[in-house]
Image: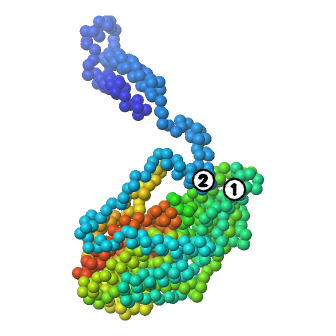
């Protein structure tokens, strides 16, 4: 209809009809009286009828125009248009039939097929990251190099991979394990090698019980398209946080797909005894994800009590994601309601495609096994490593970076650990006469559960120093993640990083301006906001943990690839970006040499009394699920 109405011929015809109707109604051009009398001599005819005859003639002429217009338009649309040579299909049935088996492959074969298909349509061009705006030849911080940062990070990756090679199911620099301790000991030696004198390694028991999975297994026992006796075992299921356990050998049950697990999707369903495939959507990361709400909805038993839950993450190119199903802020114990595990995006696609083919006679039957135990105290020894570099004022800037992390742990938090090491090496070469404020390079353990770890025993040890001489907490975290170009069909790295979020707990105008200037000089992408909630290890410097009248600040970015294997497998963290960020942090530290604690407090505001993890904002977001 839009095409017809857009035809100029039709438009002209419509104008003619409209004009005829208008003229007939108002009699703007009635029949001439003498003509009328000659045509109807001796007859009594009302004047309106005479006008009507003229009107009808105009309508008949316009109708002929309209018929011609429709015939020409129909010919253009139906008969003479060129063939569409790019349409994938032209009927619904043809499209569905064509796509039914196009992507129906186990995850390994699916990945090979899609990569081969993409290579037929695109090729990498060797793009480099956008450089800093400040001329590197004139930058006093130019000795901080990407290669140095990458080398530090690779050592951290090597320790993480060692844990996997030695049989740990939940692998990485996991808090309270030997691999976290190896990291702390290596950092201690590095700090000493920089010539720093006041270097410490303080071991302590992990402050919270930690989940250690010993079995995470998921397999398909029977399914449509499977031959008799055929099975399929997934390679990388992971239950990274506490779960109810299954009997040894696992539980075997029919699997059903519950989508996002919203109330609308569950209405009227009986899930009793079934193992559920639940889509876990990251918002934007596994830190805040839809499975947190959906798992609890399923565990209430309002739709029948399931036998178990398999969370299918939506993180691209990630074989494993350490995501939670419990409540934010430390509510992981919710996960003890039902046995659960998680799988990557490609693995979940395969499972869902099997479920697409289910019939009453041929369901999908899976076996789920989750085993593990909680460990604490002497079973989980953590610690802090740090170096103290005094300055002229006697006040200190504390730079905390947690060393523990899941899987490779580059994004969270190895790249920031590398940045902190580079800062320690850089400032160890600067004499005290050129350092106004002291620096504490703090590498703390015991972070991931519940998120506030090694900073607590550090403050307890240096309580008086922190009360009297703490200038600022400068916390770098989750830095350097590349923002991919994702057009669905084609995906690639880009030459920019994900925008960072800025924390300044008191909204100090001076500090905000300082971070903005650093971003401008070094080409740092950041969002146009400042948030004010201390939510990671810096929270230890604030109530309810400690009341130090502290100011915490720093850049952070969580994003899609948080707690996943993509940060290394897909090259997610770019060290040219980390180079710019390390230099930007050095610029901030140097500029802080010109200010006092009073300057940083001027124009500031108090920290919110309610934690972001208990806020109305978080309830609204999770309530959408």
Could you tell whether 346 is left or right of 471 in the image?
A: right
Kindly identify the residue that appears in the image at 66 percent across and 73 percent down: 371
Residue 84 x/y as whole percent: 47, 33
Q: Residue at label 1?
A: 364
Could you tell whether 258 is left or right of 7 in the image?
A: right
Q: Is residue 592 above or below residue 232?
A: below
Q: Residues within 10 Å of mark 1 (few under 14, many from 20)?
A: many
Q: CA distance from mark 1 to mark 2?
A: 20 Å
Residue most extreme to the bottom: 464
Q: Residues within 10 Å of mark 2 (few under 14, many from 20)?
A: few
In this rendering, the count of numbered labels is: 2
Quadrant of the rendered image containing residue 502: bottom left
Quadrant of the rendered image containing residue 138: bottom left
The residue mark sitting in front, 1 or 2, is 2
State the residue in front, 115 or 286. Answer: 115
Q: Are marks 1 and 2 in contact (CB under 8 Å)?
A: no
Kindly identify the residue that appears in the image at 27 percent across and 64 percent down: 133
Kindly identify the residue that appears in the image at 43 percent across and 32 percent down: 1
Residue 23 x/y as whole percent: 29, 23
Quadrant of the rendered image containing residue 583: bottom left
Residue 475 x/y as whole percent: 38, 77
Instruction: Report if residue 125 is visible in the image.
Output: yes
Please tell me whether mark 2 sits on a helix, a strand or a loop.
Answer: helix
Q: Residue at label 2?
A: 109
């Amino acid at each position: 209809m839009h095409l017809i109405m857009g035809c100029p011929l039709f438009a002209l015809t419509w104008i003619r009809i409209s004009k005829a109707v208008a003229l007939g109604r108002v009699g703007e051009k009635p029949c001439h009286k003498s003509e009328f009398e000659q045509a109807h001599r001796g007859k009594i005819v009302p004047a309106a009828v005479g006008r009507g005859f003229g009107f009808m003639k105009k309508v008949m002429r316009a109708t002929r125009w309209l018929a011609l217009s429709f015939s020409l338009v129909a010919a253009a649309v139906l008969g003479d248009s060129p063939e569409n040579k790019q349409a994938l299909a032209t009927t619904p049935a043809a499209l569905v039939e064509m796509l039914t088996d196009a992507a129906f492959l186990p995850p390994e074969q699916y990945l090979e097929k899609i990569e081969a298909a993409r290579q037929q349509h695109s090729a990498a061009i060797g793009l480099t990251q956008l450089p800093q705006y400040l001329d590197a030849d004139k930058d006093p911080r130019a000795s901080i190099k990407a290669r140095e940062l990458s080398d530090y990070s690779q050592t951290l990756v090597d320790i993480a991979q060692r844990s996997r090679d030695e049989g740990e199911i939940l692998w990485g620099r996991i808090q309270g394990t030997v691999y976290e301790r190896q990291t702390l000991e290596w950092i201690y030696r590095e700090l000493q090698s920089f010539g720093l004198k006041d270097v410490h390694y303080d071991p302590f028991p992990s402050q919270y019980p930690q989940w250690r999975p010993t079995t995470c297994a998921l397999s398909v026992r029977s399914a449509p398209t499977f031959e008799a006796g055929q099975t399929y075992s997934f390679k990388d299921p992971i239950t990274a946080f506490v779960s109810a356990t299954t009997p040894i050998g696992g539980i075997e049950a029919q699997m059903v797909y519950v989508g996002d697990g919203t109330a609308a999707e569950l209405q009227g369903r009986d899930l009793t005894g079934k193992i559920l495939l639940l889509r876990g959507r990251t918002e934007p990361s596994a830190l805040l994800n839809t499975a947190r709400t959906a798992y609890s909805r399923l565990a209430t038993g309002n739709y029948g009590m399931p036998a178990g839950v398999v969370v299918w993450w939506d993180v691209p190119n990630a074989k494993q994601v350490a995501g939670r199903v419990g409540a934010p802020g430390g509510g992981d114990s919710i996960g003890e309601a039902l046995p659960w595990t998680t799988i990557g995006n490609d693995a979940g696609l395969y499972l869902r495609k099997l479920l697409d083919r289910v019939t009453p006679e041929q369901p999908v039957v899976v076996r789920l096994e989750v085993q593990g135990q909680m460990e604490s105290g002497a079973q989980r020894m953590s610690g802090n490593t740090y170096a103290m570099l005094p300055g002229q004022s006697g006040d200190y800037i504390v730079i905390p970076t947690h060393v523990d992390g899941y899987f490779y742990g580059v994004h969270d938090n190895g790249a920031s650990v590398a940045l902190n090491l580079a800062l320690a090496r850089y400032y160890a070469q600067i004499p005290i006469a050129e350092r106004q404020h002291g620096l504490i390079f703090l590498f703390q353990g015991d972070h991931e559960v519940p998120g506030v770890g090694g900073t607590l025993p550090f403050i307890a040890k240096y309580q008086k120093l922190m009360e009297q001489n703490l200038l600022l907490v400068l916390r770098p975290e989750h830095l350097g993640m590349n923002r991919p170009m994702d057009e669905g069909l084609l995906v690639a790295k880009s030459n920019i990083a994900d925008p960072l979020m800025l924390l300044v707990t008191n909204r100090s105008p001076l500090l905000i301006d300082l971070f903005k200037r650093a971003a401008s000089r070094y080409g740092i992408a950041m969002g146009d906001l400042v948030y004010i909630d201390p939510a990671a290890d810096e929270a230890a410097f604030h109530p309810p943990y400690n009341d130090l009248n502290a100011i915490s600040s720093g850049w952070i970015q969580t994003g899609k690839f948080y707690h996943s294997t993509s940060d290394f497998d897909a090259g997610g963290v770019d060290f040219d970006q980390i180079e710019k960020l390390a230099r930007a942090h050095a610029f901030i530290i140097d500029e802080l040499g010109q200010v006092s604690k009073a300057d940083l407090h001027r124009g500031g505001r108090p920290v919110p009394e309610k934690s972001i993890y208990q806020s109305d904002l978080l309830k609204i977001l999770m309530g959408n699920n």
